Each structure stands twice: as C-alpha cells, then as structure tokens.
Image: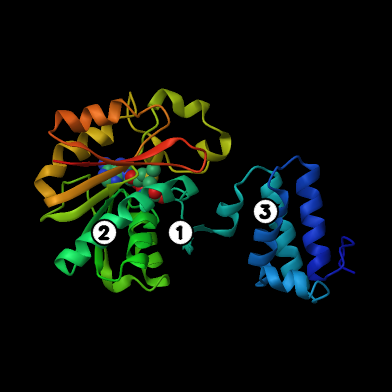
Amino acid sequence: MAEDGIRPALGALLRHIRTALQDDGRPDAALEARLIVEHFTGTTRSDAVLDPERAVSQDRVDAALAALEQRLAGEPVHRIIGARDFYGMRLALSAGTLEPRPDTEALVDLVLPHARAMAEQHGACRILDMGTGTGAIALALLSQEARARAVGTDISNDALATAAANADMTGNAGRFLAVRSNWFSAIDGRFHIIVSNPPYIASNDIPSLEREVRDHDPLAALDGGSDGLDAYRAIAAGAARHLEDNGIVAVEIGYDQSETVPAIFKSEGFMRAGAAHDLGGVLRALAFRR
Ligand SMILES: C[S@@+](CC[C@H](N)C(=O)[O-])C[C@H]1O[C@@H](n2cnc3c(N)ncnc32)[C@H](O)[C@@H]1O
C-alpha cells in the first residue's frame, strides 16, 4: 500500500484519480484521469485495460497525485501534463502558447484540400501560418501533405521555440521555419496559403472568460483589441502582397464574427472562397481569395 492508502497498481490509481475528479464535479473526470495517469506513469490506455494490476512505483504515484491536486486547484489538465493532442499529433505547450483547441481542426480541414491542390498543381505548397503558437495548424498541414512547407510566425519568442520543438518532435523540422514577426512585418515573398487562428476576443471580454482560459492561456493569444478584430484587419491588409495567384487566406473566427470578418476581407478586395463549422455546428473558419 502507498502511504495514503492507494494500492500502487495502475487500475487502482486510475480509479482513485477519476473518483476524486468526479467528486469535485469535473464533467471530463474519466478522460482527465486517464491523461494524468498515462502521462505520469508512462503507460497507455491499453495497459490500463489489459494489465490493471501493473505495479506503479511510489514516485510515479506521488507525481500523479500531485497532478491531481493541481487539477483540483483549477489548473487545466493539458497545462499540467504540458501537452495537448491536435490533428493526431501530440504537441508540447509552454507559457507563451495557447492550448490548441479541437475547434481549430475545422480550419485545418478547410485548408487541407487547397494545400493538396496547390501541391498537385505546382509540385509544392508554401504555407504561412500567422500566430502559430504551438505550430498546431502548420504542423497539421505538413503532416498531411508531404510536398508542403510552412513558415510559422509569432510575436512570442517562447511560442516560436515551442513550435520549432514541436516541428522536430513531429518529424517536420526540415519543412518548418519559425519566424518572429508582427503579422507581416518580417515576411518576404508569396505563399499559396496564408492561414491564421489569431487572437479574436474583444479586450473588454477577457475578464469574463472562463478562469481556465483567462488564467492559463497567454493574453497575447486571446486579446484581439477593442472590438476583437485588430488581427483580421492586419492580416487582410497585408495578405494580397503575400499571396500567389489563386492563393487563399483562411482564418478562424469567433462565434459572433461571421459578418464582421468577411466585411474586413471584402474591404481589401477579397471574396469568400469557403467555410467550415466546428464540432458544435458553429461557423468557425472562413477562406477568402481575390
Ligand atoms: C489564438 S492563438 C493561436 C495559436 C495557434 N495558431 C493555435 O491555433 O493553436 C494566436 C497567436 O497569435 C500570436 N500573436 C498575437 N499577436 C501577434 C502579432 N502581432 N503578430 C504575430 N503573432 C501574434 C499569439 O502569440 C498566439 O500565439
């Protein structure tokens, strides 16, 4: 028995953590318990199913229980384990990166057919991912289209270092370049695809965000200025100068931006070229071309 009475076996540890999270009213208790236990014991889901009696060393039990305490104190589970899955890849997080969200996979789904078509037509596809964070969008596209190459930009050096590490970890380092740039300030040349999930929360709305977002995702990843639209204006204003003929620019949008964002791109001479909804049925991603 461990000091606190938990049997040091995989199944017992998992049950203990799941029950504690359930008792605390966490709706995703089972999933979160699994993520914590797998991370801190170095096991997989099938280990827990097929070998629940597998012994777990005391230091690993202690690490998992410490993570449970952090979770009960309100820290998001992916911040605790320092990683989040996106488009089938496991990506490292750091203080300067947003946690990539499943909703953003809709933007990847929207852009991927264009990336494949460009690669088919030109033998290559150059992608610019603006505000790359963990590198999630660019790396997802690179993982799906072997002829694509991507530049990922960010204003945060910490995010760029994490994106570069993720490119390495996912086997895409040779096709991914991390560049510090304030939107287009350090960008030369033209791309077949410009893609971005920019900060799009209005500054005044930040204090009313859920605590787990407000206190753990970096402000630079959230704050879109007084009306939440500053980044779209910057991206729409510079995109034409950096797009190849027939190129597209595609962006994630907030739930209430389905009219304002197209109006910004229209004012810069773009027309709508595609849209995608997230898992909740909300219009989440828009593509434009000239
Ligand atoms: C909503 S996060 C998206 C991160 C990542 N692309 C994703 O989808 O998970 C927005 C990103 O834009 C970056 N950013 C904020 N202001 C910027 C600017 N002026 N120029 C470039 N990137 C910026 C933030 O640091 C952050 O990484």
User: Which x, y percent locates residue 140?
Assistant: 38, 60
Mark 2, Cα crowd under 10 Å, few <14 / some 14-19 / many 20+, is: many
Would you place residue 72 above or below residue 224 in this image?
below
The residue sitting at 78% across, 69% down in the picture is 10
Within the displayed image, which quadrant is ligand 1 positioned in?
top left
Mark 3, Cα crowd under 10 Å, few <14 / some 14-19 / many 20+, is: many
Mark 1 within 8 Å of ligand 1, using the beta carbon: no
Residue located beneath label 3 in the image: 32
Residue located beneath label 2 in the image: 115
- Can residue 66 be seen in the rendering of this structure? yes
The residue sitting at 30% across, 46% down in the picture is 196
The residue sitting at 68% across, 68% down in the picture is 45
User: Which x, y percent locates residue 195?
Assistant: 28, 49
The span from disc 2 to disc 1 (Cα, nearest Å) is 16 Å
Which residue type does callout 1 highlight?
Tyr
Quadrant of the frame with the C terminus: top left
Would you place residue 197 above or below residue 122 in this image?
above
Q: Mark 3 or mark 1: which comes first in sequence?
A: 3
- Can residue 97 be seen in the rendering of this structure? no
Q: Which mark is residue 87?
A: 1
Quadrant of the frame with the N terminus: bottom right
Q: Mark 2 or mark 1: which comes first in sequence?
A: 1
